[in-house]
Image (cartoon, rainbow, N blue to C red):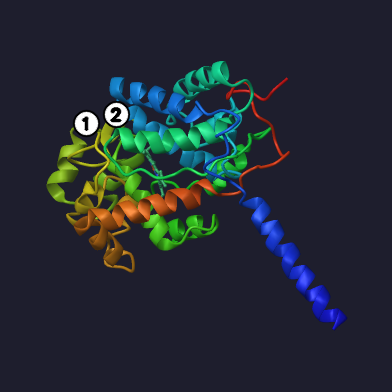
Amino acid sequence: MAASASCISLVVLVALATAASAQLSPTFYSVSCPGALAAIKSAVTAAVSSDPRMGASLLRLHFHDCFVQGCDASVLLSGNEQNAGPNAGSLRGFGVIDGIKAQVEAVCKQTVSCADILAVAARDSVVALGGPSWTVPLGRRDSTGANAGLANSDLPGPGSSRAQLEAAFLKKGLDTVDMVALSGAHTIGQAQCSSFRSRIYGGDTNINAAYAASLRANCPQSGGNGNLAPLDTTTPNVFDNAYYTDLLSQKGLMHSDQVLFNGDTTDNTVRNFASNPAAFSNAFTTAMIKMGNIAPLTGAQGQIRLSCSKVNS
Ligand code: HEM
């Protein structure tokens, strides 16, 4: 009897602990800063209309934040993680986030975290480029440090195999369907020559020959590392499902894209997302919410930064 009572209290304790780590709520700022979401949305809409690629860059920032010690805005701190291999010379949008933070601070002093601003900006970016919307759970707090080593180990690279991608996402609690759906973010934005060079110079056989030739024109065998190519061949500024139709014709830009459709277990999911835009939208929004829930700091943990690029002094 006593044993089963203590067993029940243990179950209750575990349940409470789990609830505490997932206590984000869409209404978190309804009272403390009712204007926050509208301020973020109008700033993101303006930034994306003057530079459509910025929508892609802000979405990617949220991903690179969440995969490294959780969605805690660690990626926004100057230096450190920003200098890690997957980030250096590649991440964009820090200035836009700093600008949004300044506007939000002007309305509500030290109330809205940088981690939440990033999560909302990612959603607003997708919407600004014609993609689906979702309700963003809020209440994340900001880290007091960053971790370049974790950025190097936990962010998958463009040469990853399908098994490596699955393992990297599983480590963050995201399953294979989440992984394939989140990769659909590559329906917008650009990649540098250095991210796909080996694929177009004989490294891969699963690439459309005419497509590879067209990419070689602007991505020489040596030099031109920063030359850009769109991640989606037809509509890089529209959040649609063209990424998956590209994969069906072996027009994935990076090795890590085409491995999702390469005669293996993820082929059916790719076919489904290519033929059914609503299925992709549903899977993407579900997975974005899951990704946004990775190890947030909540309650009294961390801090609300005054400036997203540095910890409070
Ligand atoms: C599946 C594993 C993934 C790998 C290996 C990967 C890798 C990359 C690489 C190498 C680039 C190009 C960087 C450059 O050349 O400068 C890129 C761009 C991008 N990635 Fe991913 N990524 C992955 C998943 C994701 C996810 C989950 C998201 C968001 C939900 C995302 C969003 C983006 C976006 C939007 C861009 C374009 C950014 C821009 O134009 O500024 N990626 N990714």
Mark 1, residues whose alpha carbon is within 10 Å: few (<14), some, or many (≥20)? some
Q: Indicate which disc residue 271 carries.
A: none
Instruction: Tell me: residue 90, above or below residue 290.
Output: above
Residue lying at 42% horizontally and 31% vertically, measured from the top left = 90
Residue at the extreme bottom of the image, as rendered: 1
Q: Indicate which disc residue 227 carries.
A: 2
> Would residue 290 be found to the left or right of residue 218 on screen?
right
Q: Amino acid at mark 2?
A: Asn
Residue 34 % position (x, y): 52, 29
Quadrant of image for the C terminus: top right
Discs 2, 1 touching: Cβ within 8 Å: yes
Residue at the extreme left of the image, as rendered: 210
Dividing the picture into quadrants, the one containing residue 305 is top right
Residue 46 % position (x, y): 34, 21
Nearer to us in this view, 127 or 246: 127
Dividing the picture into quadrants, the one containing residue 146 is top right
Q: Which residue is mark 1?
A: 218
Q: Ligand 1 shows up in which quadrant of the image?
A: top left
Mark 2, residues whose alpha carbon is within 10 Å: few (<14), some, or many (≥20)? some
> Would residue 1 be found to the left or right of residue 166 on screen?
right
Nearer to us in this view, 118 or 86: 118
Quadrant of image for the N terminus: bottom right
Nearer to us in this view, 95 or 163: 95
Question: How many numbered circles are shown?
Answer: 2
